C-alpha cells in the first residue's frame, strides 16, 4: 500500500474509526495510557492490528479519515478551507507544519523549501529539490497543485528518477490529487525517491 502510517497513528485511527468499518473488535482492544500512547491489550493482537496497514482497502479508509482530520486542522489554522495541493502537503508534513509552509509561502514564495523544512527536503527530494538544486516554496507549491499551466521544470542536476517523478506530477490534472487514487500514486512515487 502506498500509505504509510506510524504505529501510534494507525492504532489511533483504528481505535477511533474502526467501529464504523467493521473493525470494532479491534478498536475495542486498543488501550490508551495516561500519556495518550496506544497499544493493543496483547502483543499478538497488536501485530494483527498493525498488519491491517497492508490491506489497501483498510489503509485507504483510514487515510481518508486522516485527510479529513488534517483538513479540519488546516482550516482552523488558516481560517479557510484547504485548496489545491494543501491536503497533500498536510499528508507529507502534518497539518501544523503544512499551515506553517502555507504562511511562509504567502510571506516569501522565493524562500528555499529545504532550508525551512530540512527533514522533508531529505525525504522528498523530487519535491523539495536537492542540495545542488534546491526548490523554492513556490516551486514546491506549483508541483503540489499539479497545475499544467505552471511550468516548473526540474533542474538538470536532479536524478533521472526525480525528473520523471516531477514531470509526471506536472502533467497530471489538478483534479488527480482530489481523488484517493491520485494521492496514493503521488505519495507512492515521492516516498520511493
Image (cartoon, rainbow, N blue to C red):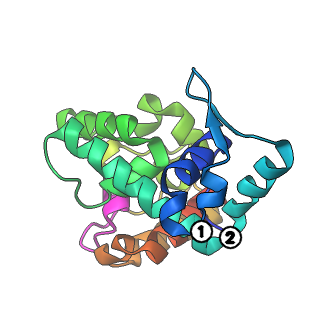
Between 30 and 139, the one lying in front of the other is 30
Residue at x 29% of width, y 38% of height: 99
In the rendered view of the protein, which quadrant contains the N terminus?
bottom right
User: Within the image, what quadrant is residue 145 found in?
Assistant: bottom left
Which percent across, then down, holds residue 72? 28, 47
The crowding category of the residue bearing disc 1, from other C-alpha atoms within 10 Å (few below 14, some 14 to 19, many at least 20), is some
Where in the figure is residue 44, as x and y percent of width and height? 86, 49
Question: Would you name the residue on which mark 2 appears?
Answer: 55
Instruction: Give coordinates of residue 60: x percent, y percent.
Output: 53, 68
Q: Give the side of residue 132 with respect to residue 173, left or right.
A: right
Q: Is residue 40 magenta?
A: no
Callout 2 secondary element: loop
Q: Which residues are magenta?
A: 139-152
Identify which residue, 72 or 122, lies in the foreground: 72
Q: Does residue 5 appear left or right of residue 170 in this picture?
A: right
Check whether the beta carbons of the residues at disc 1 and disc 2 lie within 8 A of each other: yes
* Residue beneath disc 1: 58
Residue shown at 31% from the left, 67% from the top: 151
Q: CA distance from mark 1 to mark 2?
A: 5 Å
How many numbered discs, if any?
2
Amino acid at each position: 500500500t502506498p500509505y504509510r502510517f506510524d504505529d501510534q497513528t494507525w492504532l489511533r485511527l483504528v481505535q477511533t474509526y474502526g467501529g464504523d468499518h467493521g473493525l470494532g473488535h479491534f478498536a475495542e482492544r486498543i488501550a490508551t495510557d495516561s500519556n495518550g500512547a496506544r497499544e493493543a491489550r496483547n502483543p499478538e493482537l497488536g501485530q494483527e492490528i498493525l498488519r491491517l496497514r497492508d490491506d489497501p482497502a483498510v489503509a485507504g479508509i483510514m487515510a481518508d479519515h486522516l485527510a479529513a482530520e488534517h483538513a479540519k486542522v488546516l482550516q482552523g489554522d488558516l481560517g479557510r478551507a484547504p485548496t489545491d495541493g494543501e491536503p497533500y502537503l498536510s499528508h507529507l508534513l502534518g497539518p501544523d507544519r503544512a499551515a506553517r509552509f502555507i504562511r511562509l509561502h504567502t510571506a516569501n514564495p522565493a524562500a528555499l523549501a529545504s532550508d525551512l523544512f530540512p527533514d522533508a527536503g531529505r525525504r522528498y527530494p523530487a519535491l523539495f529539490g536537492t542540495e545542488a538544486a534546491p526548490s523554492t516554496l513556490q516551486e514546491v507549491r506549483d508541483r503540489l497543485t499539479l497545475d499544467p499551466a505552471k511550468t516548473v521544470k526540474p533542474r538538470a542536476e536532479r536524478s533521472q528518477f526525480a525528473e520523471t517523478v516531477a514531470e509526471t506530477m506536472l502533467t497530471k490534472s489538478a483534479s488527480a490529487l482530489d481523488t484517493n487514487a491520485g494521492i496514493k500514486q503521488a505519495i507512492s512515487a515521492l516516498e520511493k525517491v
